[in-house]
Image (cartoon, grey):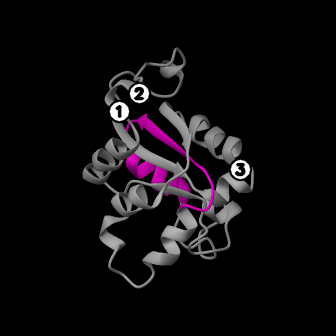
Amino acid sequence: MERTLVLLKPDCVERRLIGRIISRLEDKGLSIVAMKMLWIDSELAKKHYAEHVQKPFYSGLEKFITAAPVVAMVVEGVEAIRIVRDMLGPTNGRVAPPGTIRGDFSSSRQMNLVHASDGPEAAAREIALYFRHDEIFSYTPTLAPWFRVEGE
């Protein structure tokens, strides 16, 4: 099993798409093992986007991510990082194909609704920014045998 951080960004929350995005993740057979709503402040934004802080576009990114609450989730499943990123589609919603979350709901590069970790190291670092170990509840859904063959 693999875990990834998923953030439903301020535009997702403000547009009332939370349930639709969560449903798509669960419909795929992924498990939400931690979830909370929070308001990202400047300090957390700088930690989350540490690689972008010195870039010219950072101030706009911080203004956006701190503008309204977000929903943070830890999503778990086989190849969860790749699967979630594939489900999201390209960062720019204008070029994201139909059927992806961004392709269906976004028409912007920055206001692209959802963040997901881009690899195992990023996932571990990002999950630790938003969740304590005791806030994550791994479990095996009773429906698991209907999603994949044992050992897959």
Give the amino acid at mark 2.
Glu
Q: Residue at left 59%, top 65%?
A: 112
Q: Which mark is residue 135?
A: 2
Pick the front one: 10 or 85: 10
Q: Give the secondary structure at mark 2.
A: helix
| Residue at which label 3 appears | 17
Q: Secondary structure at mark 3?
A: loop
Which residues are drawn in magenta?
66-88
The three-letter amino acid code for the residue at tag 1 is Arg
Quadrant for the N terminus, please. Answer: top left
Look at the numbered discs 1 and 2 and tell me whether their residues touch, using CB distance below 8 Å: yes
Tally of numbered tags = 3
Q: Is residue 72 magenta?
A: yes
Query: Callout 2: 10 Å neighbours few (<14), some, many (20+)?
Result: few
Task: Left or right? Give the position of 86 relative to 105.
Answer: left
Task: Work out which quarter of the rendered image holds the C terminus and state it.
Answer: top left
Residue 70 is a magenta residue? yes
Q: Foreground mark, 1 or 3? A: 1
Q: Position of residue 106 (x, y in %)?
A: 67, 66
Residue furthest to the left: 121
Type of amino acid under label 3: Leu
* SS for callout 1: loop
Q: Residue at x 43, y 76 (%)?
A: 58
Give the residue at x 72% y 55%. 14
Can residue 79 be seen here? The reply is: no
Which residue in the protein does label 1 denote? 132
The picture places residue 53, in percent across and down from the top left corner, at: 35, 73
Q: CA distance from mark 1 to mark 2?
A: 5 Å
Q: In the orientation shown, which residue stands out farthest toward the top?
A: 142
Residue 90 spot, x, y in % from top left: 51, 68
